[in-house]
Amino acid sequence: MIKIDKIDIKILKELLYDSSQQLSTIGKKVRLSRENVHYRIENLIKKQVIKSFITIVDYPLLGYSQYTLFLELDKINEIKEKFILDYLSQNNKISWIGILAGKWSLTFDIYVKDISELNDFVEKLSEKFNENIREYKILHLIKSDYYFNKLIDEKVIEYNKRIMKKIKIDHVDKEILNMLNISSRTSYVDISIKANLTPNAIKQRIKNLERGGIIKKYSISINHKAFDYDWHGLQIKLLMPLLKIENDLINYLKNDKRVIFYYNYDKLSNYDFDVGIIMKNSSELRLFINKLRSSFYDKIKIIDTFVVLEEISSHNLPEIIFE
């Protein structure tokens, strides 16, 4: 486990809540100079505690849908696995990729404008790796939430809900979003140089994107291994597709200290939820599953479990969304 002190934890909490904050603002809250805050953040990056500075963008407002694919691989070796991972990593529609232990070998998220794009991708993937893909599942995401703060704090972060207004965006807005997607800490000055506008004009455009709900929040992605956690996944099916049960389960997951995210899929998918949980050992996992089952007796079925062995890419959105 990486050594992190109380001041580091305070800084991480501030970045989780709003990673776009000025260093001087964070410094006032944690009682450090701007220079000391900068040094500590750089050190947390160097130690691989902070993986990325993320901007949560409402991609459906930009015309995209998200799907999650699970692959079971066969006749595979290290070289072939790397070839498949490189192929996926180079696709501009794919974001997060995870290597798994369990029934599934790997999973990834893909963003498309329509089902024909998805079908085209799956057909090309199947043709290229037909000898290595034994089985696959495609699930259409309709809702999700992340609680990375639970790695360091059990409290659920409640973000201020912005008043949304319908807005039109242009290619400059997309360029701004792309730079913030790379890092939520990209400055107005750096964006202004790329977009050929004044820093103040960039600031106003970003505020407009926030008011329009396209930019939802700014946060960070934290490395769970830095805190000696394993990341387990649960695939859950509702025995009755009732909205009340779905909402009760979401509320339960939101408030459980071990749940760091959930994906909620449409009713045509093979199951309804993927749930990410952090555990120190298998005993903790067993206790979590037993408690979940007793809380939702006769309401849910756990279809499968897996362990995320390695994350190949970040949680940032793929480039295609901002083209």
Image (cartoon, rainbow, N blue to C red):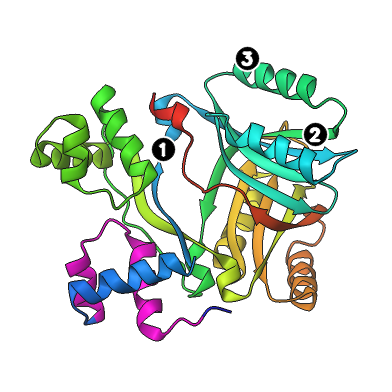
The N terminus, quarter of image = bottom right
In the image: residue 194, left or right of residue 68: left
The residue at which mark 3 appears reads as: 116
Mark 2: give few (<14), some (14-19) or many (20+) Cα within 10 Å.
some
Instruction: Classify 247 as above or below 214.
Output: below
Q: Position of residue 54 (x, y in %)?
A: 40, 50
* Label located before the other in sequence (2 or 3): 3
Highlighted range, magenta: 3-30
Q: Is residue 75 magenta?
A: no
Q: CA distance from mark 2 to mark 1?
A: 27 Å
* Label located before the other in sequence (1 or 3): 1
Q: Position of residue 197 (x, y in %)?
A: 12, 32
The residue at which mark 1 appears reads as: 58
The residue at which mark 2 appears reads as: 136
Looking at the rendered structure, the secondary structure element under dot 3 is: helix
Amino acid at the residue labelled 1: Asp
Amino acid at the residue labelled 2: Tyr
Mark 3: give few (<14), some (14-19) or many (20+) Cα within 10 Å.
few
Report the front residue among 117 and 168: 117
